[in-house]
Amino acid sequence: MVKCPRCGYDNLSSATYCVNCSYILSGSPTGQKKGGWKMGTAKKILLIVGIIVVALLLFSFIYNVSQPSHEESLNVVTADSNVQEGSTHPYSVKVNYSGDWYSKSGDANYPVEKSGHGPMSFSLDCSSWDKVSVSVQKSDGASEPLSVQLLRNGEVVGENTTSGSSNQVTISYQS
């Protein structure tokens, strides 16, 4: 037994510090315990933060790898567990006009704006089950007719043309 010189408590002979008052007992090292970490508090905090950052990066990587791709997320799983694969971009719009035009097209809740000059075709980032809306208008005010087609997997599912002084064409479609 070793008696503490500060408080007089009887400690085990193998004790480094007094159990009662934490005083360093004689004959023991005066700094760190043997086998302990010999680094300051700032380094310990930095080490812990580094471990947390590495863990978050690893979690993020695993999460991203396990998520379906954009193409896979457009597939439909039916009640009998059959997978019906959808096209990556099943809808496209074909504008036939020689002047400047502007459009809002796509999912009716989230239309995408696009503008152009002359005849053009472009894909819509919609799923095959979305309600699709196409609105194209002339930007230059010419009297030439504006013709618009909505295609689903290459087949025309909606078509409209301006008549007379009208400068806007609208198509709505839901399968």
Image (cartoon, rainbow, N blue to C red):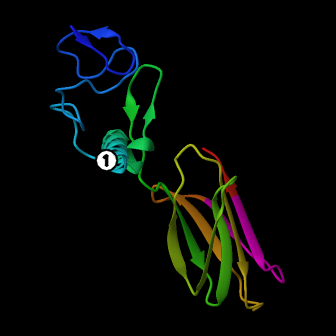
Which residue appears at 18% of the width and 33% of the height?
29
The residue closer to the viewer here, 46 or 132, is: 46
Q: Place residue 164 in its image quadrant.
A: bottom right
Which residue appears at 42% of the width and 40% of the height?
75
Q: Residue furthest right?
A: 165
Q: Name the residue under label 1.
A: 40
Q: In which quarter of the image is the C terminus?
A: top right
Region of the chain picked out in magenta, as a range: 158-171
Instruction: Report the number of discs.
Output: 1
The residue closer to the viewer here, 107 or 23, is: 23
Whether residue 66 is situated above or below residue 3 in the rendered picture: below
Whether residue 109 is situated above or below residue 129 in the rendered picture: below
Circle 1 SS class: loop
Q: Would residue 155 appear left or right of 135 to someone viewing this image?
A: left
Which residue appears at 41% of the width and 53% of the height?
88
Q: Would residue 1 appear left or right of 46 to someone viewing this image?
A: left
Q: Place residue 142 in its image quadrant.
A: bottom right
Mark 1 is on which residue type? Gly
* Label 1 packing within 10 angstroms: few (<14), some (14-19), many (20+): few
Q: Place residue 82 in its image quadrant.
A: top left
The residue closer to the viewer here, 156 or 142, is: 142
The residue closer to the viewer here, 123 or 31, is: 31
Q: Does the magenta stretch include residue 162?
A: yes
In the rendered image, residue 152, in percent from the top left (x then y), is placed at 51, 55
Q: Would residue 90 appear left or right of 29 to someone viewing this image?
A: right
In the rendered image, residue 2, in percent from the top left (x then y), is placed at 23, 12
Q: Is residue 91 magenta?
A: no
Q: In which quarter of the image is the N terminus?
A: top left
In the rendered image, residue 174, in percent from the top left (x then y), is placed at 64, 47
In the rendered image, residue 54, in percent from the top left (x then y), is placed at 31, 46
